[in-house]
């Protein structure tokens, strides 16, 4: 069954106070909904997106066959999060570049494009903004909030900021904060962007240029960290780009090394450059800085002297946590930290560690054990009676 | 696990207990405890299909490898820790027993009793036993720790565990008289020295 997605926009005139002390006003959130809200408004599921995704979670746009949402294998009619049972909401976060107000839009206070002046937004700010959208949609309580990676951080944060508004939280391939190594990768990406001469301190729009070189490198670094060593070796190995596929489909290497330091020699280089090029065509440089910073700052235990168990005492929701064995960016050990903190608080939690070779990317892929697990969990949610 | 055995074991779990079931399989025992004895708690399981079965039943389950210990669980954080047909699969069976006593105010362990008479008979004939209770060949058995009812009593004493109740199970009946000979399954209810 095909699902036609329709992007919607909601305008919020009132200022949203931000964690930094700053605020944004007159902003717009782009969102999509799938399925029907039931009579008692109890079947809403909010999907939170990660770094480079958007409100377009599921389905395709009318007349655009290849426009599947980023979690289309997970959400839709008959899918693990079944839109015949649940009313699913995808929302694009503030500061993003896919329709919600972001650094490429006009600051109502100055009449000029925000650029680098767009205020720093945090996971907590996004959750507050999402809650306002739910208010406007007449949804008091979510059946579930769900997200992977940075989206999982938002799901976790929901259970802390609005504990009574969440019955279940599904937190996939996520972490209670970033490790130093993780922040380090983000910093490399940010430096690549900021030091691109076309960045112009974040005000590149008025120069009519895009810091594509920086964006490409940022994406290349990011992409390496989303895969596992094994999967990269399996996909590319040491294959040379000059290798050709003959009529029988056999790969033969005509190739001698080119003995060049700058030409693309290995397939993995070609792949990373392609990914970088593609990304630099559609992603905003300031958004990349903002979103990686939101990742860095997220740390609910910080107000509790690093005691995650104390931080999660506020939660009321039931939890499903999922991690993937080869994910080294958001490793299983990080999910187990959250499990432990929930156990310490006697919260209902299930945790699955999926043995998958694909690294962090696995949370977006079709692993039947993973999809069945989520399907079963949402099946239970659908059966629950609720107040 | 048959329904009769589930009921036998569940009777030993006080009403309303917070339970940790190590190696919970498909979650049948925990589901029974939730429904009939007002218990809460979690299963721990490694097998993917079992984890899925637990989620389908609505039994909270944690996919963890018991050979990596119980560091996620705080001291005395459960009323009852169950190890039903789990001990015999563990590399570090003794450590897990100590961990069970640390995490739970009470432990219940059940495992196949290798000294059950048909097993002895088989060994006398010179062959490793293959029975309904121990259906594996010696070369493919997941039971890497084979012990007896009496062996466990020695191990419990060595670790300072206080045995509250010990009996055998055979065909879902309790065996109180000579369980080391007469029961295919050994069941021990105990608490740790400090508990």
Image (spheres, helix red, strand yellow):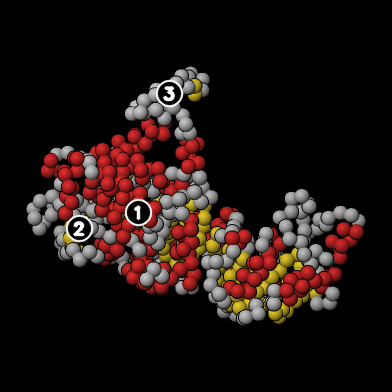
Specify which label sits upstream in the sequence, 2 or 3.
Answer: 2
Q: Residue furthest left?
A: A111
Disc 1 designates what residue?
A183
For discs 2 and 3, the disc positioned in front in the rendered view: 3
Q: Which quarter of the figure is the C terminus of chain B placed in? A: bottom right
Marks 1 and 2 sit apart, C-alpha to C-alpha, by 20 Å
Compute the Cα span from label 2 to label 3: 49 Å
Say which of marks 1 and 2 sits in front. 1
- The spot of residue A40 in percent (x, y) is 35, 67
Residue at (74%, 50%) from the top-left corner?
B140
Residue matched to label 2: A119
- Residue A290 in the image, given as x and y percentages of width and height: 26, 53
Indicate which disc, 1 or 2, sits on the residue closer to the N terminus.
Answer: 2
| Secondary structure at numbered mark 2 | loop
Q: Earlier in the sequence, mark 1 or mark 3?
A: 1
Q: Position of residue A48 (x, y in %)?
A: 34, 56
Pointer 2 with pointer 3, Cβ within 8 A:
no
Residue position marked by numbered label 3 in the rendering: A257
Left or right: residue A281 versus residue A366 is left
Can marks 1 and 2 be said to lie on one chain? yes
Q: Nearer the viewer, residue B19 or A303?
A: A303
């Amino acid at each position: 069954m095909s699902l036609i997605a329709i992007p919607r926009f909601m305008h919020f005139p009132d200022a949203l106070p931000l964690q930094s002390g700053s605020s944004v006003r007159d902003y717009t959130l782009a969102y999509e909904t799938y399925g029907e809200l039931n009579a008692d408004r109890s079947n809403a599921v909010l999907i939170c997106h990660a770094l480079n995704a958007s409100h377009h979670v599921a389905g395709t746009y009318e007349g655009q066959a290849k426009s599947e949402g980023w979690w289309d294998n997970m959400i839709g009619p008959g899918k693990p999060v079944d839109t015949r049972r649940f009313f699913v909401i995808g929302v694009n976060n503030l500061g993003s570049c896919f329709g919600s107000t972001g650094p490429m839009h006009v600051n109502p206070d100055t009449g000029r494009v925000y650029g680098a002046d767009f205020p720093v937004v945090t996971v907590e700010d996004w959750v507050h903004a999402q809650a306002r959208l739910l208010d406007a949609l007449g949804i008091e309580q979510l059946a579930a909030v769900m997200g992977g990676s940075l989206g999982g951080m938002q799901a976790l944060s929901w259970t802390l900021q609005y504990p009574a508004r969440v019955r279940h939280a599904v937190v996939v391939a996520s972490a209670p904060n970033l490790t130093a190594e993780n922040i380090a990768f983000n910093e490399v990406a940010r430096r690549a962007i900021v030091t691109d001469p076309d960045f112009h301190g974040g005000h590149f729009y008025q120069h009519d240029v895009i810091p594509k070189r920086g964006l490409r490198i940022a994406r290349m670094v990011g992409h390496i960290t989303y895969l596992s060593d094994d999967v990269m070796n399996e996909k590319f190995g040491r294959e040379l780009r000059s290798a050709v596929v003959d009529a029988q489909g056999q790969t033969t290497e005509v190739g001698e090394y080119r003995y060049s330091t700058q030409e693309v020699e290995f397939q993995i280089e070609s792949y990373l450059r392609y990914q970088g090029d593609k990304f630099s065509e559609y992603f905003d440089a300031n958004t990349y800085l903002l979103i990686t910073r939101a990742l860095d700052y997220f740390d609910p235990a910080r107000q509790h002297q690093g005691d995650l168990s104390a931080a999660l005492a506020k939660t009321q929701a039931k939890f499903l946590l999922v991690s993937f064995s080869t994910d080294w960016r958001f490793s299983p050990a990080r999910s187990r930290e959250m499990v432990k903190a929930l156990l310490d608080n006697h919260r209902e939690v299930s945790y699955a560690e999926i043995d998958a070779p694909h690294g962090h990317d696995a949370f977006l892929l079709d692993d039947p054990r993973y999809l069945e697990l989520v399907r079963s969990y949402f099946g239970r949610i659908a059966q629950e009676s609720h107040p | 696990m048959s329904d009769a055995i589930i009921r036998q074991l569940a009777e030993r779990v006080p009403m309303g207990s917070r339970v940790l079931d190590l190696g919970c399989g498909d979650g049948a025992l925990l589901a029974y405890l939730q429904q009939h004895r007002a218990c809460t708690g979690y299963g721990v399981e490694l097998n993917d299909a079992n984890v899925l079965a637990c989620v389908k039943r609505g039994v909270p389950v944690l996919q963890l490898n018991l050979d990596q210990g119980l560091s996620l669980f705080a001291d005395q954080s459960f009323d009852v820790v169950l190890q039903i047909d789990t001990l015999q699969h563990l590399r570090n069976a003794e450590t897990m027993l100590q961990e069970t006593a640390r995490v739970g105010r009470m432990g219940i362990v059940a495992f196949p009793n290798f000294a059950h008479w048909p097993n002895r008979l088989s060994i006398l004939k010179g062959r490793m036993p293959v029975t309904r209770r121990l259906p594996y060949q010696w070369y493919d058995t997941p039971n890497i720790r084979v012990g007896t009812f009496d062996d466990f009593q020695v191990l419990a004493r060595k670790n300072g565990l206080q045995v509250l109740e010990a009996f055998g199970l055979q065909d879902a009946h309790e065996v109180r008289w000579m369980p080391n000979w007469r029961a295919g399954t050994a069941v021990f209810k105990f608490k740790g020295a400090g508990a």
